[in-house]
Amino acid sequence: MSAKTGKSLSRNTDLNPEQQKTIRMRSVNPLQFLLSAIRMAIREQEPHFVMLPFMAQGHMIPMVDLARLLAERGLAITILTTPHNAARFQSVIGRAIGSGLNIHISHLKFPCSEVGLPDGCENFDMLPSIEDAMKFFTAMGMLKEQVEEMLRQLKPPPSCLIADMCFPWATDVALKLQIPRILFNGMGCFSLLCMHMLAICKDWEAITSDTECFVVPGLPDRFEITKAQLRGTPNDPDPDARKFWDQIREAEVEAFGTVVNSFEELEPEYIKEYMKAKGKRVWCVGPVSLCNKDYSDKSERGNKASIAEHECLKWLDSKEPGSVVYVCLGSLSRTAASQLIELGLALEASNRPFIWVLRHASEEFQTWLLEEKFEERIKNRGLLIRGWAPQVLILSHLSVGGFLTHCGWNSTLEGITAGVPMITWPLFAEQIFNEKLIVNVIKTGIRAGVEEPVLFGQEEKAGVKVKNDEIKRVIERLMDGGEEGNERRKRAKEVGEMAKRAVEEGGSSYLNMTLFIEHVIAEQATCQGRTANHDNALVDHENNDILIVP
């Protein structure tokens, strides 16, 4: 402040505070008034959360559910995705908008041709070959500038960016725009803590044998694992995989916090230890699938079902309560034909009703089905669904008594929420950790017997992991009565009820959602306050004889 300005103020020391404020306001130049008006508009603007899901079903589905839950709290929501991906959940979002929720979808142009992918290849499950995976990730990286420009143009301006972990560059974009970046990674805290501890405690890397068991360090409970079981996980020692995951971990450091599709009652010690290990906010707001209360939302969660819902329900209605085994190995599974044959023979030999979802079944396996007249042999007892299944609808039906699952986190939570005991068959990624949570922590499942995961894209080479007689024994063990089975079933129902209570008003996840929104809005104000202070400093520098109004 100049001496001139100081003298001007000293002459008015006998005025009351309100009169002094009026004189100060008159001293401010038009630019200062503009900045004050901008700050006022920021304080009054509508909260606007922007979501950027990774283009794969297992990542998109919970993000869309989360968008609807946030919109139900009165927030404006924008989902950034490509046209082909938007089409998969357009009807669900359309119903949400029709009910009064403020959700908008903004289309990104996916650079297919630029990386050598076919036009319209906008989702991981659309890749012609697993060899094209790197092209897909390259294309994801090319979205950075497009996303940044879109965020700059959004009205009202975004309050935060909730981005999937597979977009490490989202942290840079959020920092540049002075908004909080929230991490979403589609896993539970048990798996996240396991992977974090293995990443920072590297003694296990000195083990030379792939099959030698070692204890995962730093966990509340003792769990053993082998190096072979870490292939395809974020702890895979492969150099290319490690480089990718290192980028994700570096981006996490600058993120404001992590929103997790889990609930406190499911894994309390692991949530607490994960928060302590990361030193970041963690909000457990799940299971988000429970936002699907409408029949249509349940049946179309993720995609349009490949079977008419009424046909599926009619079949289920014809079965005894708790008698049906539901089998689904995930949206990305390309299980070897030889292994699928073993699984089919086991389901047939079990003499129990079953629904079997077949995704990406090879020509060899389809030929076996026809030549062996498999569907004719299991007619009235087995139902095969080729393509997308209405999984939430099926699992919530009273006739379903068991779930053979690949242990993807969405499927794991859906099984838990439905109160259904599980047979665990992990394939890749963090699924081996989810198996340990199901079997050893919450004790609602039993292992199929898969000793090591199948590397994604190498399923045919892996061949048979579990023989049909072993699978049959596990099915019988899960579905039969007896003290062990009854206790497991009782435990599954108890955990399912915990999940439902968590998302109800006053439940742990409901309260965490409230805290999440409050924390983000407060952090947004802090970020914008830093920007405003910077702008004030510029004005003060350029007009050093002007009094700056705080």
Image: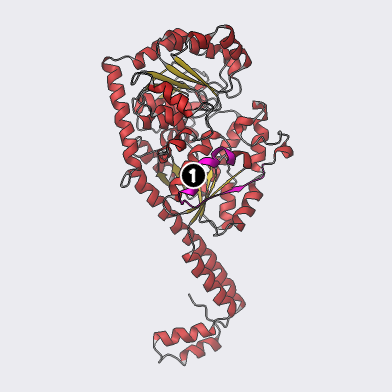
Residue 25 place in picture, x, y as percent: 50, 82
Residue 256 place in picture, x, y as percent: 48, 50
Check if residue 307 falls in the magenta segment.
Answer: no
Residue at horizontal 55 percent and vertical 25 percent from the top: 387
Residue 480 or residue 531, whichever sits in front: 480
Residue 70 place in picture, x, y as percent: 44, 49
What residue sits right under mark 1 in the picture?
Answer: 95
Check if residue 87 falls in the magenta segment.
Answer: yes
**Magenta-colored span:** 86-110
Above or below 528: residue 202: above
Residue 520 visible in image: yes
Q: Secondary structure at mark 1?
A: helix
Residue 35 or residue 396, whichever sits in front: 396
Q: Quadrant of the N terminus?
A: bottom right
Which amino acid is tagged 1? Arg
Q: How is the image coloured?
A: secondary structure
Q: Is residue 8 left or right of residue 215?
A: right
Residue at horizontal 56 percent and vertical 28 percent from the top: 237
